[in-house]
């Protein structure tokens, strides 16, 4: 099956609304240049090429910077207040076609290394596992900071979600890249309450909700610095340029 048909019933939401305070820059984090191209531009171009039926970019803080850099040709949703990534995803709901069956969620600042092959593998795994939610993970071999969320899995099935401070041994870090079955997502996202950890509406709580309902939540592991890398500082931006240059 050709890629453009493979994703015809899929929508993608790219979250580009955060402040990115650790970048210490007046620029919105996702528009910083990476080898001469905005960070967020990499995943947008990849998704468009793959034939997703809809790509929605959620903007908020310094939204006009993102729009000016990417252009008016895209579909934008606006997160009015900084209330977390689940709240940002909710802002995209009205822009997603009813015919779509699956909603992918990507972060605008850490998806630049994803290849079409990785995204297709992720989706194939979601379909084969009959999951309600699938989430990309990284092995916690490099001691990710406590600001991330973590999961415990059995045979790739996620069984529990932890905040960074609560994680124990044999956990994997959540990358915040997801596939949701659309009908389940919109029926349940409004059930979320503010996180007891951050006070925001967050996507890991959707995993916990799905698990409480007996749904299958699939974890798909990718390799740190080969398949995925997050940019949260100027030093990490420089490292990202090196990683991307070596990958080309």
Image (cartoon, rainbow, N blue to C red):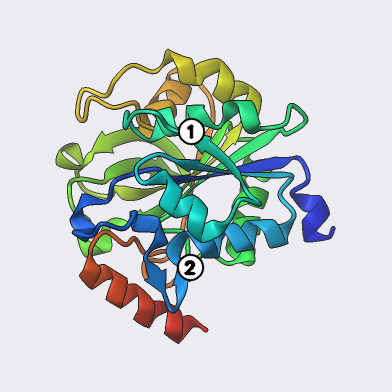
Q: Position of residue 194 (x, y in %)?
A: 29, 20
Q: Viewer-nearest of labels 1 and 2? A: 1
From the top left corner, tell me how far across and down residue 247 is, in percent. Answer: 48, 81
Q: Is residue 221 above or below residue 35?
A: above
Q: Give the residue at mark 2.
A: 113
Of the 4 image quadrants, the one containing the N terminus is: bottom right
* Residue 129 horizontal side relative to residue 65, left or right: right
Separation (CA) of disc 1 from disc 2 = 22 Å
Residue at the (29%, 42%) spot, across then down: 149
Q: Residue at x 57, y 21 (%)?
A: 186
The picture quadrant where one finds residue 81 is top left
Residue sitting at x 41%, y 60%? 31
Visible residue check, residue 222: no
Q: Position of residue 2 (x, y in %)?
A: 83, 60
Compared to 85, does 43 lie above or below? below
Does label 1 or label 2 sit earlier along the sequence?
1
Residue under the image location 26 percent in, 36 percent down: 162
- Residue 63: x, y in percent? 42, 45
Q: Which residue is mark 1?
A: 89
Give the total of numbered labels: 2
Task: Using the rendered view, name the quadrant where residue 117 is placed.
Answer: bottom right
- Crowding around mark 2 (Cα neighbors within 10 Å: few <14, some 14 to 19, many 20+) is many
Q: Residue furthest top?
A: 191
Label 2 element class:
loop
* Residue 151 appears left or right of 52: left
């Amino acid at each position: 099956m050709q890629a453009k048909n493979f994703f015809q019933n899929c929508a993608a939401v790219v979250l580009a609304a955060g402040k990115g305070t650790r970048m210490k820059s007046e620029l919105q984090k996702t528009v910083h240049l990476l080898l001469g191209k905005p960070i967020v531009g990499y995943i947008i171009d990849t998704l468009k090429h793959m034939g997703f039926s809809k790509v929605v970019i959620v903007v908020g803080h310094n939204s006009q910077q993102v729009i000016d850099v990417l252009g008016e040709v895209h579909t934008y949703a606006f997160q009015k207040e900084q209330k977390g990534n689940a709240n940002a995803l909710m802002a995209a709901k009205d822009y997603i076609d009813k015919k779509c069956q699956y909603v992918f969620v990507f972060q605008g600042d850490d998806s630049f290394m994803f290849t079409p092959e990785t995204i297709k593998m992720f989706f194939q795994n979601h379909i084969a596992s009959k999951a309600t939610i699938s989430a990309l993970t990284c092995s916690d071999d490099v001691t990710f900071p406590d600001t991330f969320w973590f999961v415990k899995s059995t045979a790739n099935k996620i069984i529990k979600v932890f905040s960074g401070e609560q994680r124990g041994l044999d956990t994997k870090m959540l990358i915040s890249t997801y596939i949701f079955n659309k009908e389940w997502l919109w029926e349940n996202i409004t059930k979320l309450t503010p996180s007891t950890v951050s006070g925001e509406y967050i996507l890991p709580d959707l995993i916990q909700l799905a698990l409480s309902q007996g749904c299958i939540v699939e974890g798909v592991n990718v390799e740190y610095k080969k398949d995925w890398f997050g940019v949260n500082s100027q030093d990490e931006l420089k490292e990202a340029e090196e990683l991307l240059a070596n990958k080309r």
